[in-house]
Image (spheres, rainbow, N blue to C red):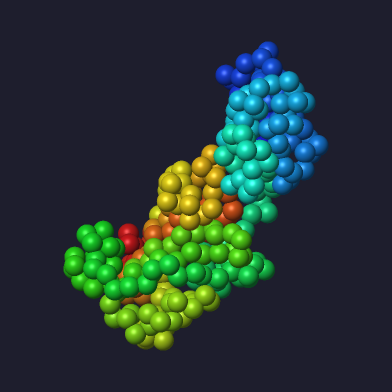
Amino acid sequence: MRILPQDNLLETLPVELREKSKTGQAYIEVRRKILLGEYQPDQLLLPSEIERTYHVSNTGAQFLLIRLAIEGLVKVLPIKKKTRATSAALGEYRVADLKMRDRMHTTRHGDFVSDVGKGGYPAYKETLILKIDYADPEVARLLNIAEGEKVIFHRNLQRRDRETVVCINDQYLPFWFVEMMPELEKPDSDVYELLRKLGKKPYWCTETVDSVPANTVERAMFGLSFDDPTYMFKIVRRSFDCEGHPLEVQFLTDRGDIYRLHYSFHLYASDIPETLRDK
């Protein structure tokens, strides 16, 4: 479904909502104020203020804010400082920016820094792990090598800016890439340029995308609140040369609340180079 006008959202409430309860009425009113712009994007919503304003319990205030977060109207962020020692809040609640078209746009052309940097972001990579590893069955299949062969494993955080991690990337390269390992640690590294320096010619890319909730490890690495309902894009990205030989594979976990993924592709298989069909 296309993005709905806000008046359509105002007219359509969750079917299971108990509209006559105090919490239900408070939910409807806070929701209305967000959709009408009375609450501005990034405005802090304090459960204690909702308690006082709408005469609901702390549990009711937390519940309605979580419900609004599930609906995409509120963001749940890690709490920075408890205002009271007895505060039960696990996160802080801020009004979400509903303009999905304003999210970080990626054309999927080139490496992360060159792609996202074009949008005006000071994008860079932070290496967490860089080592020689051995291909497990999945990596061996995707790189078209034997199981147990040496590979280069590079785990990096991709940052839109110093405050925001937008992707966790687990990248595997064949062992012939080994002389370029030090270059991968640079925050502006471009794997496709490094492949060219080795005489390889990256030509074609395929991506398979799944949408899943973030697990606890990913939440910690992204700096997400435990209650944040944000979904992740799980992307398997493979690059090939013009003869269809795989050059590298990336297992990307991208934040679904920040990224917009743009793809262009041939409509008919007959227009795809034969060596690259069904890769």
Q: Position of residue 158 (x, y in %)?
A: 51, 65
Tell me: 88 left or right of 254.
right
Q: Quadrant of residue 251?
A: bottom left
Residue at point 23%, 61% (across, down)? 136
Figure check: 266 above or below 203: above
Residue at 55% x, 42% y is: 228
Q: Quadrant of the C terminus?
A: bottom left
With respect to residue 141, does 75 lie above or below?
above
34 on left or right of 184: right
Q: Position of residue 75 (x, y in %)?
A: 63, 43
User: Residue at 71% of width from left, 23% of height from top?
Assistant: 26
Q: How many marks?
A: 0
Check the image and name the residue furthest to the right.
38
Looking at the image, the residue that sits furthest to the top is: 20
Displayed quadrant of residue 22? top right
Visible in this render: residue 192?
no
Q: Nearer the viewer, residue 6 or 47?
A: 47
| For residue 92, side relative to residue 108 (left or right) | right
Q: Give residue 119's quadrant in the image.
A: bottom right
**What residue is drawn where x is 63% and y is 70%?**
122
- Where is 11 relative to 181, above or below? above
Residue 165 appears in the rendering: yes
What is the x, y in percent for residue 210? Answer: 42, 48
Looking at the rendering, in which quadrant would you find the N terminus?
top right
